[in-house]
Amino acid sequence: MNEQLSIFNDKFDRKEELEEKLPMVKLKGTPEAYYLFRQRLYYALLHKDPNKYQLIDKVIEQAKAKGLSYILCKVSAEAKKFIDLSRQVAGERHRAISFLRLKPIDQHNVLMGEFEIVHQTGEIIMLHFLKRFPKYRIMLVFGNEVLIGQGNEIFREKIERRKVTLPSTPDEFERYWLAFYRSQYIPERRNLKYFQRMIPKKYWRWVTELKEFGLN
Amino acid sequence: MPDTEKKLEVLGAAAKYDICASTAAPQKRQPNSNYIGSNAPGGICHSFTPDGRCVSLLKVLMTNSCKNNCQYCVNRVSNDFERSSFEPKELADLFIELYRRNYIEGIFLSSGVQRSTTYTMERMIAVLEILRFQYRYRGYAHLKVLPHTPPDLIERGAKLADRMSVNLESPNPERLKSIAGEKNFMLDLIAPINAIQKQVEKGLLKAGHTTQFVVGAAGETDAELLRTTNWLYKKKNLKRAYFSAFIPTGDTPMAGAKRVPLLREHRLYQADWLMRYYHFELGDLVMKQDQNLSLDIDPKMAHALKNRQRFPLEINRASFQDLLKVPGVGPLAAKRLYRARKEHRFTNLQELKNLGVVTKRAKPFILINGIKQGNINEIVTVKQLELFENYSSSLAWAEAPKLLT
């Protein structure tokens, strides 16, 4: 795991400890506010927007002058944008760990999945699955990049996606999942507007069970 | 697993009216790597059905055989249809395979009462034992507790599950009698809740315990439902109550009954959230004369309109509790506002909007530096205002019934 990740995964009980790790940042706020700000900052840094660094500089200046609450409470337009960047990254991670399906390749002790991401969220998605399935090697394909995780290590490789054929053996458990998914629908409560709010259209291609109701 | 697909269809459909889909639970420490699964503190939904409901748990019945004869239930004993059931090992194996594929976030195990409560609960607990001890599963598990479950089985279940729940279905003994005459409200339902509460107090069941009501099946009022809910929150450490609008299903004596509007369920949830997150007391909720919440105006707006003399509030000075009473200000926005105010004085609506206040709704009820921001007539009609004159203003409705105290 790289150094950047380990900084953000440690918990700091005291403000001094955090200042030791990030000595350049001297900001007014409680330890909880520091913890939250650091998490927001980490996520914002993973955003695809090339202008994020200028925005982050401005936000840090504002935090120095007015305190961390001013930023975390989104009072200024810059603070709001900064929190929005962070939330978009957190949202992508959340959707990936929700909708990404894994395929077990038991002879190699591998769980393999594919998803589309636009921010640099590959590693934090991988961390989730490594923690959940520590006995397995995890292989995640994100477009032209493949991440392989095992234990505390994550390896990254570039691939030419269209040249790679992923195993497509039929899986009886997919049938069982579809049977269960169909069984959960209550027609009297049909509410497609709410449904679309829950799964934005760009994720529909990954949530294959939606086909069961003609939605994919 | 030759007929697994069929069983899943039947026993999944039989469990779909159980609402709880939450998977939020504190993370457990991982002593070694020889396990599978983890809890996500915020909860995860792996899919959604076209009704917009989250599919996060493998929510199935162990069996749809049942010796009870509840009026509203399709699994009632007098219904003549093919019964089905899972063996504990079969269900545990199936669950682990679906979990490994990231289809689901945990298990929600319920059941009809086959032979006896003890027999059925033993089988449900056996599923969790296989998962926890054989597969070393560390993820989320919700165990439904059947009516009249003895305390020793509840204790065993509590050691294995993250959450347990007893479905009350009705708010009081009289209402329950009309839809499930065989069940005794206190002995069959409240007694298991007491036993679960003891386990929660011991530090087990990190995700707490919950209950569910069938709204409208027994002709009960919103006041009755909210009184019981409030009592459960205050006296029984209930984590959360779920409300399910009654939908008549075929092959039951209530098949011809009227469907309850989903909006009523929605209003009950709004009122419930006001009590849990907005520091509202039961008596703060405004009831109509028929002891139901208004379907036309949400409970928070109804409270604000009923108490117009308390508004507008100065946003730079109001207490945290008062901020929570302003329509358009949620707990998160109130918290942000309260914190940011220590170092910043708010001067305009845009700043409030940035931190999450729904200014359109909040405007008539706030002052910024002494300046009024809007009129009530901008958000409600004169007719709606007149309606409120007929609403109950006393706190009498909020008093708990004698039996529950």
Image (cartoon, coloured by chain):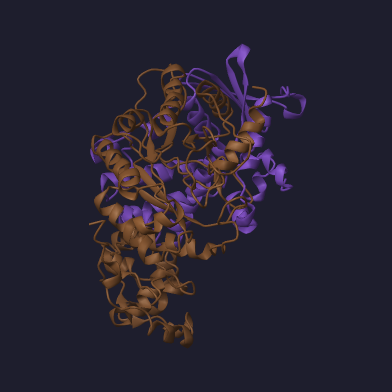
Q: Quadrant of the N terminus of chain B?
A: top right
Residue at the limit of the structure toward the top, as seen here: A107
A106 vs B9, nearest the viewer: B9
Using the rendered view, name the quadrant where residue B346 is placed.
Answer: bottom left
Outermost front residue = B78
Q: Is residue B93 left or right of residue A179?
A: left
**Taking A63 as reference, is A114 left or right?**
right
In the image, is residue B325 above or below residue A70?
Answer: below
Percent position (x, y) of residue B123? 45, 26
* Residue situated in front as seen by the camera: B376 or B141: B141
Across and down, in percent, residue B129 comes to 41, 22
Q: Across the whole image, how many numbered discs are drawn on residues? A: 0
Q: Quadrant of the C terminus of chain B?
A: bottom left
- On the question of residue A145 being in view, the answer is no
Q: Position of residue B102 (x, y in %)?
A: 56, 31
**Position in image of residue A20 (x %, y %):** 28, 34
Up the image or down, A182 lies above or below A2; here it is below
Chain corresponding to brown in the figure: B
> Residue at point 37% right, 73% down?
B287
Is the residue B106 above or below the residue A166 in the image? below
Task: Place residue B256 in its image quadrant.
Answer: bottom right
Determine the residue positioned at 50% across, 38% down.
Answer: B66
Q: Residue at x 28, y 56 (%)?
A: B231
| Chain A, chosen colour in render | purple
**Closest to the observer, B216 or B296:** B216
Q: Is residue B93 visible?
A: yes
